[in-house]
Amino acid sequence: MASIEAVPLPGCGQITLGLINADFPTGPLPGDVMRDVLARPAYWSLCWGSGLALAQFILGNPHWVAGKQVVDLGSGSGVVAIAAALAGADRVVACDSDADARLATAVNAELNGVRVDTAGALPARCDILLMADVLYDKQNLPLLTLAQQHANEVLVADSRVTELPDPGYDEILTINALTFPNLGEFDEYGTAHLFHWRAPDRNTTPAPPPRKY
């Protein structure tokens, strides 16, 4: 059976996460195990590429979150929330509907010596809301509008979506990053697109010109 081990992240080595071991089994699973996996998928046991990309961006550009109230929506392993805390956010709330993901985030935050609060629902308001790898299902697209109702700014990172249906979001850059441990993803999923939305008439961080990382 696969196990969880604490490992530094490639390209983001100041963050250590408890993730599934790199040699996890990839062959057919017994029927009962497969049913358990489908019933409670352990998304939090991997650091998804877009999450890694957004964490790298935040650590390299801490002014986006420093001194701010930050929410990480769909936190998974907690990599983005932890990066925000390390970058000087005043408060970070990692929001995920999966109790196991919230536990993983809490454990990983402690592992990195930072405080991250966890929640199963969005706080009423924050300065900036972060989302990575949450748009893999089209049914999740309404999260783009929901995020605007709770935040002054939103940053979205996703490698499976190259443009957003909401024209209020501007693509500001692309970042090359792969899921870790490596899932052998297609090359097209190795580039995360970063989108920014800002509420009108807010004194918020100006978006940088589009560029590649």
Image (tube, rainbow, N blue to C red):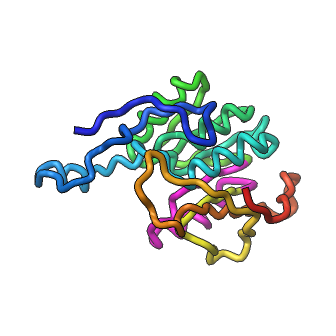
At 51% from the left and 24% from the top, the residue drawn is 111
Is residue 30 found left or right of 132 in the rendered image? left
Instruction: In this rendered view, identify the residue nearer to me: 161 or 102.
Output: 161
Is residue 147 found left or right of 5 in the rendered image? right
- The segment highlighted magenta reads 128-153
Residue 65 coordinates in the image, percent (x, y): 75, 42
Does the magenta run of residues contain 127? no
Q: Is residue 34 above or below residue 94?
A: below
Say if residue 50 shows up in the picture. Answer: yes
At 87% from the left and 61% from the top, the residue drawn is 201
Q: Is residue 160 above or below residue 79?
A: below
In the current view of this chain or complex, which residue is farthest to the left? 31
At 69% from the left and 57% from the top, the residue drawn is 154
Residue 57 coordinates in the image, percent (x, y): 71, 48
At 68% from the left and 56% from the top, the residue drawn is 155
Q: Quadrant of the C terminus?
A: bottom right
Q: Is residue 178 above or below residue 71?
A: below
Q: Quadrant of the N terminus?
A: top left
Residue 125 coordinates in the image, percent (x, y): 67, 48
Instruction: In this rendered view, identify the residue nearer to me: 30 or 164.
Output: 30
Say if residue 99 shows up in the picture. Answer: no
Residue 61 coordinates in the image, percent (x, y): 78, 44
Q: Quadrant of residue 55?
A: top right
Does the magenta run of residues contain 150? yes
Q: How many numbered marks are there? A: 0
Q: Is residue 104 above or below residue 148?
A: above
